[in-house]
Image (cartoon, helix red, strand yellow):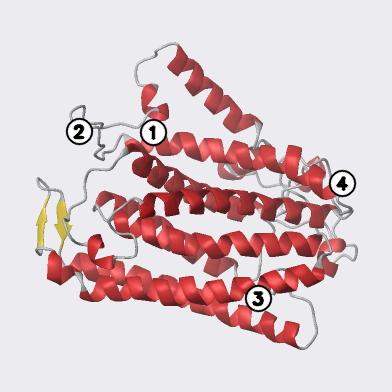
C-alpha cells in the first residue's frame, strides 16, 4: 500500500496514481497540494524566488535590498542592531538552503555515490543526505569557531553575561546567526521529506527547541551563548554524517573507528561543555547582570527569562541523553563484533525493498514494499 504521508526519501517523483489516499473521492486539501508541489520542485520553486529577488535587487526595486543585505547598520560604528526586517534576510536564506541542498544532492552527491559503487537508490539518497549534512556542519562549525575565537567569550562563560546587553553585532556575527537560524527553519521542511526515522518525534522536539533558543537568544541579546552552543552542537554533527557516508561506501572498519571518535566527541561537547553552559546560565548571570526588563535599553534579564532558557536547555539535554542511550547501544554491538549502524533508521533490508520511482530531482518518493500490507 502506498504510504499516505509525505515522508518519502528525496529521490524520485510521485506517480499520479499514488497521489491520492484510499479516500480518492475526497478532495486533496490545499495544504496537501502545496506540500506536494514544494516537495516535487525543491530546485525550481526556490530558484524562482531567488531569481525574482535578485532581479529586483539588481533593478533597485525598493525593499528588495532587505532580502539580500543585512539591515540596521550603524554608520558610525559599523555594527548592526536587530529588528523585524531581519526576517526578510532569513526568508531569502531558507529559500537558498532549499535550493542548495536539492542541487548539491542531485548534481554532486548522488552522482558521487553512483560513481563510488552505491547501486541502491535508497542508499544513494541516504549517502547524499549525509553528504549535505557533512558539508554544512563542516563549514558553519569552522565559521562559528572563528567567530568565537575572536570574541571575548572564547572559553570564558562569564563573558556571556559581562557587559550585557550585547545588542550590537559585527557583520560576520549577525550574518552567521541569521543564516544558522534560516538553516534550522529549513530543517523542519527537510524532516518532512526525508524517510522518517524511529525518533521522528524527538527530532521534531529537538528542532522546535533549537529554533526557539536561536530566535529568542537573538531577540533578547544572548547571542554569545548562542554562538557557543552552536559550536558545541555542530562538532559531532560533522563526524556522524562522515561515518555514515563511509558505511554506505562499505568502508566498515573506518566507519567503526570514526563512530568511536564521534562517541567521545559527543560526550565531551554535548554533555560536558554543554552541561557547563547550563551551569553558567543557572549560576553566573546574577553575578554580572542587573535583573530588569527595559525595552528602551534592550535589557531583557529577569528571573522568569533565566528559568525559561534553563527549561529549554534542560529539555534539549534530555533529548541528547535519550540519543546517547541509543549511541551506547550501537557501541555495544560494535564491541561484540557487529558493525556500527544507526538504530534510529529503518533496517537496510527495508530500504532495499522500496520501489523507487522517477529520477533524483528533489521530489518526494512514493514507494511500496514488495510485499503489500
Name the one closer to the observer, 150 or 346.
150
Q: Name the residue under label 2.
A: 77
| SS category of the residue bearing label 3 | helix
* Residue 248, quarter of picture: bottom right
| SS category of the residue bearing label 1 | helix
Q: Report if residue 6 is visible in the image.
A: no
Q: State left or right for residue 285 relative to residue 358.
A: left
**Which of the two discs, 2 and 1, labels the residue nearer the N terminus?**
2
Farthest residue to the top: give it.
59
Mark 3 to mark 4 CA distance (whole Å): 28 Å
Farthest residue to the bottom: give it.
336
Neighbour class for label 3 at 10 Å: few (<14), some, many (≥20)? some
Q: Where is residue 63 in the image (x, y as percent from the top left)?
A: 35, 21
Q: State left or right for residue 152 relative to residue 15.
A: left
Residue depth check, mark 4 versus mark 1: number of the one nearer the observer: 4
Q: Decide: marks 2, 3 in contact (CB < 8 A)?
A: no
Q: Mark 4 points at which residue?
A: 115
Q: State left or right for residue 145 relative to residue 340.
A: left
Mark 4 to mark 2 CA distance (whole Å): 51 Å
Q: Mark 1 points at which residue?
A: 88
Neighbour class for label 2 at 10 Å: few (<14), some, many (≥20)? few
Q: Name the residue under label 3.
A: 260
Residue depth check, mark 4 versus mark 2: number of the one nearer the observer: 2
What residue do we see at 52% from left, 47% from top? 186
Mark 4 to mark 1 CA distance (whole Å): 39 Å
Mark 2 to mark 3 CA distance (whole Å): 47 Å
Q: Where is residue 262 in the image (x, y as percent from the top left)?
A: 61, 71
Amino acid at each position: 500500500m502506498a504510504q499516505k504521508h509525505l515522508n518519502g526519501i528525496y529521490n524520485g517523483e510521485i506517480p499520479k496514481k499514488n497521489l491520492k489516499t484510499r479516500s480518492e473521492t475526497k478532495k486533496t486539501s490545499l495544504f496537501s497540494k502545496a506540500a506536494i508541489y514544494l516537495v516535487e520542485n525543491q530546485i525550481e520553486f526556490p530558484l524562482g524566488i531567488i531569481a525574482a529577488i535578485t532581479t529586483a535587487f539588481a533593478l533597485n526595486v525598493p525593499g528588495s535590498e532587505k532580502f539580500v543585505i543585512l539591515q540596521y547598520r550603524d554608520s558610525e560604528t559599523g555594527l548592526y542592531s536587530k529588528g523585524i526586517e531581519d526576517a526578510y534576510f532569513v526568508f531569502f536564506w531558507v529559500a537558498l538552503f532549499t535550493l542548495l541542498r536539492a542541487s548539491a544532492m542531485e548534481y554532486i552527491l548522488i552522482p558521487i555515490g553512483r560513481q563510488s559503487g552505491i547501486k541502491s537508490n535508497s542508499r544513494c539518497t541516504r549517502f547524499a543526505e549525509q553528504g549535505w549534512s557533512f558539508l554544512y556542519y563542516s563549514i558553519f562549525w569552522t565559521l562559528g569557531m572563528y567567530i568565537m575565537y575572536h570574541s571575548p567569550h572564547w572559553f570564558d562563560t562569564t563573558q556571556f553575561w559581562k557587559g550585557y546587553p550585547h545588542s550590537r553585532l559585527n557583520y560576520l556575527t549577525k550574518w552567521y546567526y541569521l543564516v544558522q537560524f534560516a538553516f534550522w527553519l529549513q530543517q523542519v521542511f527537510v524532516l518532512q521529506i526525508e524517510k522518517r526515522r524511529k525518533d521522528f518525534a524527538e527530532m521534531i522536539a529537538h528542532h522546535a527547541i533549537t529554533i526557539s533558543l536561536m530566535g529568542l537568544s537573538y531577540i533578547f541579546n544572548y547571542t554569545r551563548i548562542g554562538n557557543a552552543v552552536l559550536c558545541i552542537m555542530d562538532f559531532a554533527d560533522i563526524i556522524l554524517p562522515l561515518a555514515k557516508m563511509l558505511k554506505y561506501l562499505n568502508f566498515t572498519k573506518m566507519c567503526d573507528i570514526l563512530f568511536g571518535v564521534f562517541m567521545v566527541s559527543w560526550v565531551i561537547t554535548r554533555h560536558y561543555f554543554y552541561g557547563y553552559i547550563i551551569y553558567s546560565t543557572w549560576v553566573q548571570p546574577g553575578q554580572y547582570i542587573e535583573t530588569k526588563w527595559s525595552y528602551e535599553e534592550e535589557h531583557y534579564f529577569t528571573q522568569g527569562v533565566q528559568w525559561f532558557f534553563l527549561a529549554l536547555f534542560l529539555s534539549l539535554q534530555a533529548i541528547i541523553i535519550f540519543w546517547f542511550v541509543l549511541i551506547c547501544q550501537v557501541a555495544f554491538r560494535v564491541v561484540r563484533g557487529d558493525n556500527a549502524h544507526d538504530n534510529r533508521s529503518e533496517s537496510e533490508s527495508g530500504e532495499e525493498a522500496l520501489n523507487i520511482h522517477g529520477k533524483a530531482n528533489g521530489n518526494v518518493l512514493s514507494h511500496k514494499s514488495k510485499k503489500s500490507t
